[in-house]
Image (cartoon, rainbow, N blue to C red):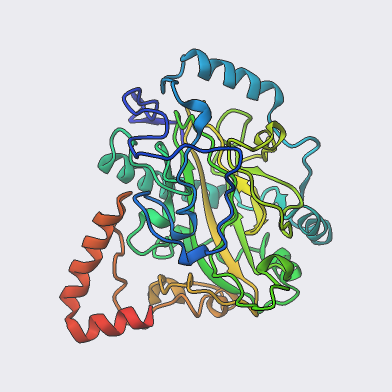
Amino acid sequence: MSGTADGETELGWHESVPPNGFVKRPRSSVTDTNDNPAGLAAEANELETTPEHYNLVAGDPTVVGWTRTYDDPNVVALRARLDQENGIPDLELVEPADVDRAVELFDRDGFVVVRDALDPALLQRMRAAVDRVVDRLIEVDPDNSVGGGAGGLPHRYSFGSSSATRHMLHVPEWCELVDLATTTPILTAIFGSPNYLLGGGGGDMALPGAIEYQGLHSDNIWEELPDRSGRVTVRDLPVPVVTINFPMIDFTRVNGPVRQIPGTQNSHDPIPSLAAEPAWMKLSTVCPVPAGSAIIRDNRTWHGGTPNLSHDVRAMPNMEYFAPWFRSEGVIRSMPYERWQELSPHGRRIARHVMLGAGERLIGEGFIHPRRAEREAFRAKQLEELGAEQAQEYQERS
């Protein structure tokens, strides 16, 4: 993940791409919030993003007028400030064996960082798998202007939403993350049961030159509870969804570490827009963190991407897990039967709702593109090849 292609051409930093990209965005104000109670039912718009993030349409108003170059004076000043001030003070990293402390921090802060979650060999395999996806995205979006992920910002992509399957569970290396000796005991303790479920796997990356902050948000891969009394929301429940992010390179203060706002997993306060977000929240980043760690987080905890002002690709593959009692339309059958067979017994059990049947074709497998229209066209063609009856059955089961 050196940040260069073939050792010569630098990735990212496309000066031709304006701040916030080419999408026409409304102005953000201090009265706006980034709440999205509709979750998966949010109304679609032109953003190249996941359904639960259609509300992050405003982009980053603070970079308007900047130039997307490494030595732009505004970029230089921000890099210097981040290098001095970025990072959660006294961030504690725990060992994989210290399950009790990991759960204690997770319950307190809504996330925990576990060092050495990936052994060196698996880390290398994952880096190679990520590089293949990065190469494909750059091939089809050479100036990185389309982007994607939460908010549809340029130079920033979601692995899952860029895949025509909506996940990366068809990739063998991603499937190796499903059941790890370093994370499974912690997940079991967090959920209070080994009977949690695999919901999917994807992740995100920020290329060099991703100068924008991504708005704070929660990953609401659900629709809000239909409690007509108004007494209970998803935020009042035990943790429903846990995502584990795996940094592929060391997180530094300037290469786009994720920011997490501790203790917000149960908060009913409005999530502030970037225009309203206090300065300390922008600096509440998970760094420094070594490559191969696991950032285990409650999906409700406020979080967001930060500028990658370095020369390195900052990538974080992930796995998503649902509590035993939780269900969501976000669960999509996206793991080929052959991949499912390769899992451990525990992995096969928790992945039973995302697996396909023996001999069943995974629609969209292997097609990566940041534009939704391209992915949908590819899927439509493959569904047409199945025939009307089989295509309808496939869609109803997915």
Q: Quadrant of the C terminus?
A: bottom left
Q: Position of residue 114 (x, y in %)?
A: 71, 51
Residue 51 visible, this angle: yes
In this image, 326 relative to 58: left or right?
right
Residue 296: image location, x then y, percent: 66, 55
Image: 372 above or below 352: above
| Nearer to us in this view, 215 or 179 | 215
Task: Classify residue 154 by image quadrant.
Answer: top left
Q: Residue at x 58, y 21 (%)?
A: 79
Vertical side of 363 occupied by 56: above or below: above
As displayed, is residue 39 above or below residue 61? Answer: below
Does residue 285 sit above or below 217 in this rendering?
above
Q: Residue at x 48, y 49 (%)?
A: 150
Residue drawn at (24%, 80%) of the image: 391
Q: Nearer the viewer, residue 334 or 325?
A: 325
Q: Nearer the viewer, residue 323 or 219?
A: 219
Query: Relative to 166, is 218 on the left or the right?
Result: right
Q: Is residue 132 left or right of residue 96?
A: left
Front residue of this view, candidates 371 and 113:
371
User: Which percent across, then down, holds residue 308?
Assistant: 52, 31
Q: Residue shown at 74%/37% (left/top)? A: 88
- Whether residue 207 sits left or right of residue 290 in the image: it is left
Q: Quadrant of residue 208?
A: top left
* Number of marks in the rendered image: 0
Q: Position of residue 125 (x, y in %)?
A: 47, 50
Q: Is residue 310 visible?
A: no
